[in-house]
Image: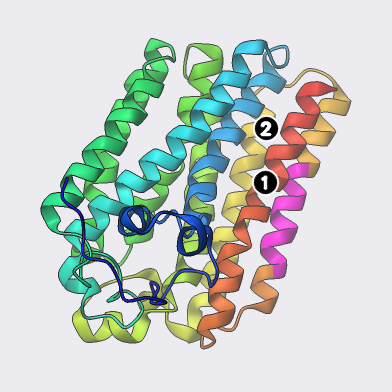
């Protein structure tokens, strides 16, 4: 892989957090590739990883608790989320390079700004995907096949905004697939409970990614890119988001109840996590101003904490 063109001294990607570790500490030659993987913006890795934690913890609380192998499942999911989020973002930037060049927030990204060529990006994507595959192949057969199946969703997502007003659904299908993989990695099979957990995650993704999409709705309208933010508009977004919030909470509660958790303390603790999840989303909704792009970004990023609430409560219930 040839050396990419370097950005001028002090220049950063416009939509990355100021002072991120890539800009401060990464060797200069690696920065364009790390930026291509969004390593300078870890929220996406968290949002991909958290459903894995949900699936693993729910499997543990309904199947006699955690075992030593679950430590590797958690570590493997963490590494896999980082790598596959990076590969997915690289694929997204390859397919969206012309769109990104037309949007103020994204035109400084590595491909449209000329830091990385398309050929280099394809090679980098392949490297990340292959390392992730090595990790996946340490899991059982059901988890492996589920992981392989997710590649179809990853491949389709960047094109969704070209043909549907609901690209966030395709993002949700892919980003929450880890709930199924982690459950299967623990149990060796699939069941109804993780499917409901996956559906809950899709509703959650519709919630947070609609908030995120409000940052770009003016640019998206100019270049013809579709999103739920554009579909709902400023007037109707809160009503739709409230519906996604309710759906996410009810579906997660159903997953907990269907899982067959033995013991009232465990069940109460698990459902308390669901309630905390809903409360966090409700607080976001109360603070939301869809015309304030800075506030939309802050609220979007806060979903890391929203998602960690049920993960921690479910893990706690498995340890009780």
Give yes or no for residue 282 being in the magenta stretch.
Answer: yes
Q: Which residue is mark 2?
A: 256
**Residue displayed at 72% across by 68% down:** 283
The residue that label 1 is drawn on is: 308
Near-viewer residue (246 or 121) = 121
Q: Nearer the viewer, mark 2 or mark 1?
A: 1
Residue 171 place in picture, x, y as percent: 37, 52
Please report the bounds of the magenta region as a residue range.
273-283
Alpha-carbon neighbours of circle 2 within 10 Å: few (<14), some, or many (≥20)? many
Q: Quadrant of the N terminus?
A: top left
Residue 48 lies, in percent from the top left, at 48, 45
Q: At 40% across and 23% down in the image, what residue appears? A: 135
Mark yes or no: residue 92 visible: yes
Q: How many marks?
A: 2
Looking at the picture, how far across and down is residue 172, in whole percent? 42, 50
259 in relation to 83, above or below: above
Percent position of residue 224, x then y: 20, 78
Q: On the picture, is 2 further left or further right than 61? A: left
Q: Is residue 195 visible?
A: no
Label 1, residues with CA under 10 Å away: few <14, some 14-19, many ≥20 = many
Of the residues under marks 2 and 1, which one precedes in the sequence? 2
- Quadrant housing residue 26: bottom left
Nearest the eye: 301 or 239: 301
| Quadrant holding the C terminus | top right
């Amino acid at each position: 892989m040839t050396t990419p063109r370097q950005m001028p001294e002090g220049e950063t990607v416009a939509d990355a957090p100021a002072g991120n570790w890539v800009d401060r500490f990464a060797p200069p030659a690696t920065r364009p590739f790390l930026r291509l993987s969004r390593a300078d913006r870890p929220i996406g890795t968290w949002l991909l990883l958290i459903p894995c934690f949900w699936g693993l913890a729910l499997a543990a609380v309904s199947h006699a608790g955690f075992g030593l192998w679950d430590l590797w499942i958690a570590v493997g999911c963490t590494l896999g989320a980082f790598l596959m989020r990076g590969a997915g973002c690289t694929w997204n930037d390859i397919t969206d390079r012309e769109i990104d060049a037309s949007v103020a927030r994204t035109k400084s990204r590595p491909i449209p700004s000329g830091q990385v060529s398309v050929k280099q990006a394809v090679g980098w994507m392949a490297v990340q995907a292959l390392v992730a595959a090595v990790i996946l192949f340490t899991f059982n057969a059901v988890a492996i096949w589920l992981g392989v199946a997710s590649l179809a969703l990853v491949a389709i997502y960047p094109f969704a905004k070209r043909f549907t007003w609901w690209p966030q659904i395709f993002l949700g299908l892919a980003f929450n697939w880890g709930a199924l993989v982690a459950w299967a990695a623990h149990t060796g099979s699939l069941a109804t409970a993780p499917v409901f957990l996956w559906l809950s995650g899709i509703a959650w993704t519709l919630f947070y990614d609609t908030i995120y999409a409000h940052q770009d709705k003016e640019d998206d309208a100019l270049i013809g890119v579709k999103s739920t933010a554009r579909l709902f508009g400023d007037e109707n977004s809160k009503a739709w988001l409230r519906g996604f919030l309710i759906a996410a909470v009810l579906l997660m509660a159903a997953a907990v109840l269907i899982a067959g958790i033995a013991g009232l303390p465990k069940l109460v603790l698990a459902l308390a996590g669901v309630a905390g999840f809903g409360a966090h989303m409700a607080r976001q909704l109360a603070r939301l101003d869809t015309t304030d792009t800075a506030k939309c970004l802050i609220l979007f990023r806060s979903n890391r904490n929203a998602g960690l609430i049920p993960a921690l409560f479910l893990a706690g219930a498995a340890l009780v």
